[in-house]
Image (cartoon, rainbow, N blue to C red):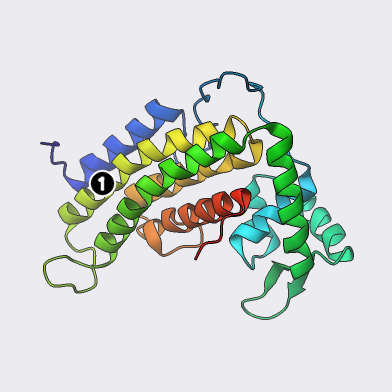
Amino acid sequence: GPQKLSYPNFCRSIAQSIRSAGGFALADGPVGSPPAATTIAGMNPTPHRSDPDLVVLHALRCIGTAPCERLAAAVQLSQADVESELIDLARSGLVTYWRGGFGGWTITEAGRGTDDERIAAELDQTGSRELVGRSYDAFLVLNPELLEVCTAWQLRPVDGLPNDHADHRYDARVLQRLSSLHRRGQAICTDLAGVLERFSPYGSRLSRALERSAGGELGYVTDNTDSYHTVWFQLHEDLLVTLGTPRW
């Protein structure tokens, strides 16, 4: 069976495994690129780079309402560039800004329609529909496992009570399961990023969330706007929208 690690040893082990597998730096340092994707026969080995306005519009579609700084971090563009794109998109009626404590930028119905059209055209233009479809099928295999891990993180299986994270050995076992899933999920992220560059931030964002969780920032599993579960949910939404598949 798998080796049982103490919580501190597991933290060191997971950081080492992520660095060696994908070249990612620790959470307080720069995050590198995911491993290079395997070249698919008949496809351009250079990933397609979407126009910046589409990157911002589509990311907002997948994230939901978000402030500019959160959106910039998600797409890995400068806040100034994202703000400029948002202003232009707002002038075109594709996004709008909601004020208030939980306010932020959000996509409009016109923006959804434009995003649908441009994303579908991009998929056809790049000939990547088949690969994205296969990646989505692979994602669906892992998705129930991810939900089980998140439930185990939030609720203790013995009594069903909320996990207070006092049992570090239990948390380490759950994070070990998440680390195993993460290695398999990275292959999906790498394949997607190999054809459409806009998918490239997901791999590093998931790795960062996992490392921060293993480093003691426990909210980065399920309870943070940049948590593993949140980024995974956004990837799921991205795949659905890209393929034109309804969630329900």
Tell me the residue at 19%/74% (across/down): 161
Q: Position of residue 194 (x, y in %)?
A: 58, 29
* Depth check, front residue: 120 or 173: 120
Label 1 secondary element: helix
Q: Is residue 208 left or right of residue 121?
A: left
Q: Is residue 158 above or below residue 70?
A: below
Q: Residue at x 62, y 65 (%)?
A: 64
Residue at the (84%, 65%) spot, across then down: 90
Q: Is residue 152 shown to the viewer in this render?
A: yes
Query: Which quadrant, please, contains the N terminus?
Result: top left
Q: Residue 176: x percent and y percent?
A: 25, 44
Residue flagged by tag 1: what amino acid is it?
Arg
Crowding at mark 1 (Cα within 10 Å: few <14, some 14-19, many 20+):
some
* 86 to 4, vertically: above or below: below
Left or right, 14 with respect to 121, comes to: left
The answer to whether residue 215 shows anywhere in this view is no
User: In the orientation shown, which residue stands out farthest toward the bottom?
Assistant: 100
The image quarter containing residue 61 is bottom right
The residue at which mark 1 appears reads as 177
Q: Position of residue 100 (x, y in %)?
A: 68, 81
Q: Quadrant of residue 10?
A: top left
Q: Quadrant for residue 105, please give it.
A: bottom right
Q: For this view, does 36 lie left or right of residue 129?
A: left
- Number of numbered discs visible in the structure rendering: 1
